[in-house]
Amino acid sequence: MADETQDLDRLFERLAREGGTQGDPEEHPSVDTLAAYHGNELSPEEDAGIQEHLASCRRCAEIVLDFASFLAEPASEPEVASLEMAAESRRLQERIKAESEPAYSRASWRHWPAIAAVLTLVVVGFYFVSQPDRSVTTLDAVGALRGGEVEVVPLSHDLVLLNNSGSSFEEYRVEFEEVSKNRVVQVSGLREDRPSEVLVRVPRRKLEPGKHVINLLGIRGDQEYHVGTYLVDFQGR
Amino acid sequence: MSDDDLTFRLIEQIQAGVDVDESFRRLHDLHYRRVRNHFLYKGFSPEESRDLTQDVFLRVFKGIGGFRRESRFEKWLFKIVHNLLSNEVRGRHAEKRERKETSLDAAKEDESIGAAIEIPSQDPSVLDEAVEKERLQALRQALAGLPPQMRLCCELRYVKGFKYQEIAVLMKISIETVKAHLHQARKRLMDKLGDPGGEGGRRAREHDRG
């Protein structure tokens, strides 16, 4: 019996070294799908498919385990906020204020003291008059959080494309596809400026105002992978 | 009011531009510990965890205008955490997190079975290798013949090396069911594979003697 047990363990060990019964899968479900699996939001057939995948894919199994442990963490009690939390909250507010135009800034400005608004306008106005325009607009991929919204962006702005694909690449390439003229302008040799953020210097001399589909492609070895699609309507020059 | 209700109410206020700073501070405080602890759990230092948590909430702030109530906030938050973690892990923490099992009741016997056992290599001869491959193929076939859930438990435990608790989460079954599946699977597999000192083993030993 002990021999049989040892023999079975030895065979399993060898099977593990050889990559299991199926080998590593090439396609993976999205993080959303894995979270939906954990939350019992899939059909029994989909569930069975995910379970088969998890048995052969450590990466996706780790994501499900991470999600489970993330949910298992209790939420904080706002009433008993720790000193650390309060300090971090203040630090975050400062960082937010330092960042370029947040999504809700127009709404929140209504609540600022009038003097702060005036001072801000003076500073911003001075900036636009005295500096070449190097503003940056941050874009989310279509279908991620904002659905299919077209962002209106001044052609003078550079872009930060958020990579929400879950994969990071050493190099990126961007295609600007002009919708009305079916013309494509490319920018290569891009890298992540910050984690999951690809800064794109817009080739404004080559582009015309109007609607563009922007495709972000990640490069790994000889292969290119589609990372995200972004919709913009360039205005002015 | 539940945490979920409070979360959605705060998000609605932020999206409507009502009392944004205070609402976002409360949203941050409500979910701060969950995010920070997750980074700690993933092996980052307290300082790194605080910085990464900041980055997460900065992204939350930037993207919250597009958040839709159909989705659970924690799911959306996790996606941001996961994306950030993917980049960080690639850059700084490639080593796997330590896999220490907290002892389960009567788990010692069970846990000693399987992936942890190391059998010294015996430099097998060509015939040994052929026999070994045959037995490996037999194991593959025997595994394929197991009921799906039992087979998947086996692969997760003995091939991938996951812990019982982890398998229970991955398969969405109780830890007792995992143990029962594994116990039953080993029995069935050993029956199918037969005595290691049987025909195949004998052939190999005779070859060694000859």
Image: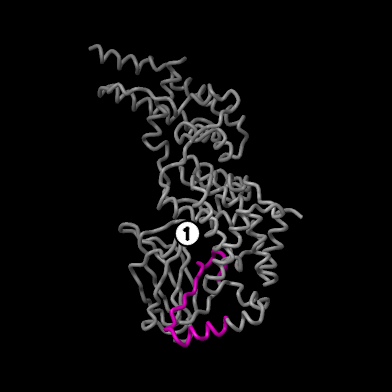
Relative vertical location of residue B171 with respect to residue B39 in this rendering, above or below: above
| Chain under disc 1 | A
* Residue lying at 35% horizontally and 72% vertically, measured from the top left: A187
Q: Position of residue B61 (x, y in %)?
A: 58, 65
Q: Nearer the viewer, residue B159 or B66?
A: B66
Q: Position of residue B5 (x, y in %)?
A: 72, 57
Quarter where residue A147 is shown:
bottom right
Estimate the x, y position of residue A88 in percent, counting from the top left.
Answer: 58, 58
Q: Residue furthest left?
A: B210
Secondary structure of the residue carrying numbered label 1:
loop
Label 1 crowd bin: few (<14), some (14–19), many (20+), radius 10 Å = some
Q: For the magenta stretch, what is the residue range?
A: A120-148
Give me the residue at 41% from left, 43% from top.
B95
Quadrant including the N terminus of chain B: bottom right
Label 1 sits on residue: A165
In this view, the residue in front, B153 or A199, is A199
* Looking at the image, residue B40 lies above or below residue B152: below
Residue type, mark 1 in image:
Ser
Q: Is residue B174 left or right of residue B93?
A: right
Res. A18 image quadrant: top left
Residue at horizontal 42 percent and vertical 76 percent from the top: A177
Whether the magenta-drawn stretch holds residue A157 is answered as no
Q: Quadrant of residue A145?
A: bottom right
The verdict on residue A142 being magenta is yes
Tally of numbered tags: 1
Give coordinates of residue A138: x percent, y percent: 50, 71
Nearest the viewer among A124 and B192 is A124
- The colour scheme used here is one colour
Q: Judge by depth and name the residue closer to the eye, A166 or A52.
A: A166
Q: Is residue A119 above or below residue A3?
A: below
